[in-house]
Amino acid sequence: MGDLTDTYYYEMAESYMESYLDDPEEYTPADRLRITRLMASYRKGNISRLFKRMRGRAFCTGLERKLETCRPESESERQLLELVREGMALMGKGVPCIMDYQYDWLSEREPDFMPALLESQIALAYSTDDEITRDMMGTFSTDMQEAYNLTPVSIMLLTPETDHIFSMDDFPERFAGWFNRFVFHATNEI
């Protein structure tokens, strides 16, 4: 799973912010300073380093063992630990990747508007409440009025080597259900 800086929407948000930073009607001096610092953090600061670390080697080895020894102090922490345990069955080695389930149900050779790929719909974000992320979500929502989302579904290619009939896989639905619960909890309970 990539991070939001790998998407076209991030580039658009960054360009928009840069073009309006000097406009006194758009931002106050304090807003300009805060946004300039935020953009610097996304480019080469703490946010950038965090995303690079998440792309690299595993930074939390032995998580299963650590989860067993962790003692939550509140109901919110207990729920978070349960969500992490549940999510571990959906991610990791030997488990499918949700990005492999991308399916274009309205495929055209030359569409008027390109569909939103899963990479722009599912990405790691530093915050859901900073100017860059809000601008990206707004642009994405606007684009979706003209286009459509690609959805994760189970597919099976039929080839001469196919040796079994299609059997339904509910991984996309299980992942989406867990992901929605996890994001809701992380956004509203922590």
Image: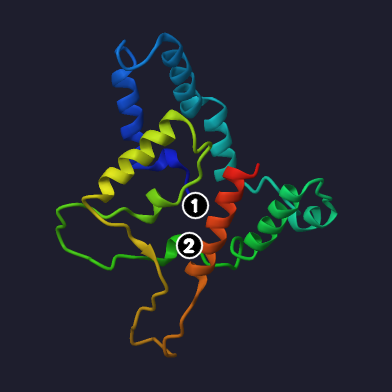
Nearest the viewer among 136 and 95 is: 136
Residue 173 x/y as whole percent: 49, 68
Residue 59 in sight in this render: yes
* Label 2: which secondary element: helix
The numbered dot on residue 135 is none
Labels in figure, total:
2
Q: CA distance from mark 2 to mark 1?
A: 9 Å
Q: Nearer the viewer, residue 57 or 82?
A: 82
Q: Nearer the viewer, residue 58 or 17?
A: 17
In the picture, measured across the screen, residue 160 lies left or right of residue 100, that is: left
**Amino acid type shown at disc 2:** Ile
Residue on which the image places disc 1? 1
Give the amino acid type for the residue marked by disc 1 in the picture.
Met
The image shows residue 72 at horizontal and vertical percentages of 80, 49
Mark 1 is surrounded, within 10 Å at the Cα level, by few (under 14), some (14 to 19) or many (20 or more) other residues, namely: few
Q: Is residue 116 left or right of residue 163?
A: left
Name the quadrant of the C terminus. Answer: top right
Neighbor class of circle 2 (other Cα within 10 Å; few <14, some 14-19, many 20+) is: many
Q: Are marks 2 and 1 in contact (CB under 8 Å)?
A: yes
* Label 1 SS: loop
Residue underneath mark 2: 98
Image location of residue 58, percent across then percent down? 65, 49
Q: Residue at x 78, y 54 (%)?
A: 67
